[in-house]
Image (tube, rainbow, N blue to C red):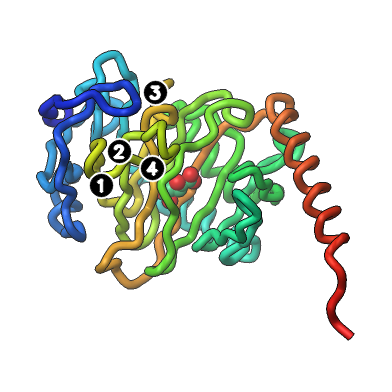
Amino acid sequence: MSVQAPVMGVMGVSGVALANPVTVANPVKMDAVAACGGGIEGGAIVSSAHTSSGVVLLDYADVVPGSDARLLEHDLSHMRALIDSAIDSVQSFYVKNPTFIGHQGKECTMHRRVCFLADPQDTHGYFYSKQLMQTTPITPECVALMEAVRTDFGVVCNGMLFNEYAPDSYISDHRDAKDNAHKVHDVFAINHGVSRVLRIKEYDYVTKSGCTKRNGRWWDFATREYTGLHMCGSDFQELLTHGIPKMAATPEGLRTSITFRLHDKERESKQYNSYIKGKRKREHASALVPDTQD
Ligand SMILES: O=C(O)CCC(=O)C(=O)O
């Protein structure tokens, strides 16, 4: 059994059938969700099912037949020590609230601490919003954890992105790049620390972002410490966004996520060249700004 079958409604802007407007739960009652291990859809807790490869939290084929997008949850309690030491090993590499120049020259901030580890021979770094996060060479503790993730869950990966969230930190709805850097579209995330909400939304092709309550569906899941969340399927990153929103009542304490992806320097070359071009353009533009100081 997977998530409850939705009531199908109007055709959405994306061309896929969307459900009738859903009323999304107000601040999720974390305890209730964590206790059942399920998600909240339109305010109702949906069921989850155990499979040999984890618990199916969301099977999007129930919404859009033919889709292979699924969200699975895995118990990682046997990896506690590995997870703890990997997180300890990266503490000095974090960058806090990095800023970058985004769309139309707007200064944007990433509201969290982040670092990216991989072998620089495998990748130029982590690409996001036309930016590049430099690669920190991978620590032995991270190598050990990555090896365990590969062996136990068959996740093909060579890079680890750490996101650390304080109570007021968040990551906006987004889709992960599904070409260039990531040959395999699956993203495997480890949860550590306090429970936060992972929000999955249908992608709205008009606004190029997650849907609203009126034109699509969304699901909230409580992240649980020492579990892995596996966003898998060839169309997951095409049809769905994910984010960690700031809620009205976010628990005190830190949450860290470690996401594992496969990076490929050769496939990144187009993205890298366009990043370098953009960087040169920005540097050139700022060199032309007159110095107004005495
Ligand atoms: O913190 C998380 O679980 C999500 C991180 C994320 O969205 C990402 O790395 O793309």
Q: Residues within 10 Å of mark 2 (few under 14, many from 20)?
A: many
Q: Residue at x 28, y 32 (%)?
A: 54
Query: Would you say residue 30 is visible in this rendering?
Result: no
State which quadrant residue 32 falls in.
Answer: bottom left
Is 36 displayed left or right of 209 in the figure?
A: left
Query: Is the CB–ligand 1 distance for label 4 below 8 Å?
Result: yes
The residue mark sitting in front, 1 or 4, is 4
| Amino acid tagged 2 | Glu
Q: For the residues marked 1 and 2, what is the alpha-carbon distance in whole angstroms? A: 10 Å
| Amino acid tagged 1 | Phe
Which circle's residue, 3 or 4, is located before the other in the chain?
3
Which quarter of the rendered picture does the N terminus lie within? Answer: top left
Q: Which residue is mark 4?
A: 242
State which quadrant residue 3 falls in.
Answer: top left
Q: Which residue is mark 3?
A: 233
| Amino acid tagged 4 | His
Question: Where residue 24 sits in the image (x, y, percent)?
Answer: 18, 49
Question: Where residue 20 sits in the image (x, y, percent)?
Answer: 14, 33
Q: For the residues marked 3 and 2, what is the alpha-carbon distance in whole angstroms? A: 14 Å
Q: Residue at x 42, y 59 (%)?
A: 170
Q: For the residues marked 1 and 4, what is the alpha-carbon distance in whole angstroms? A: 11 Å
Query: For this rendering, which residue is in front, 270 or 56?
Result: 270
CB-based contact (under 8 Å), mark 1 and mark 2: yes
Q: Which mark is residue 190?
A: none
CB-based contact (under 8 Å), mark 1 and mark 4: no
Which circle's residue, 3 or 2, is located before the other in the chain?
2
| Amino acid tagged 3 | Gly
Q: Which residue is mark 2?
A: 73
Which circle's residue, 1 or 4, is located before the other in the chain?
1
Is 287 displayed left or right of 263 in the figure?
A: right
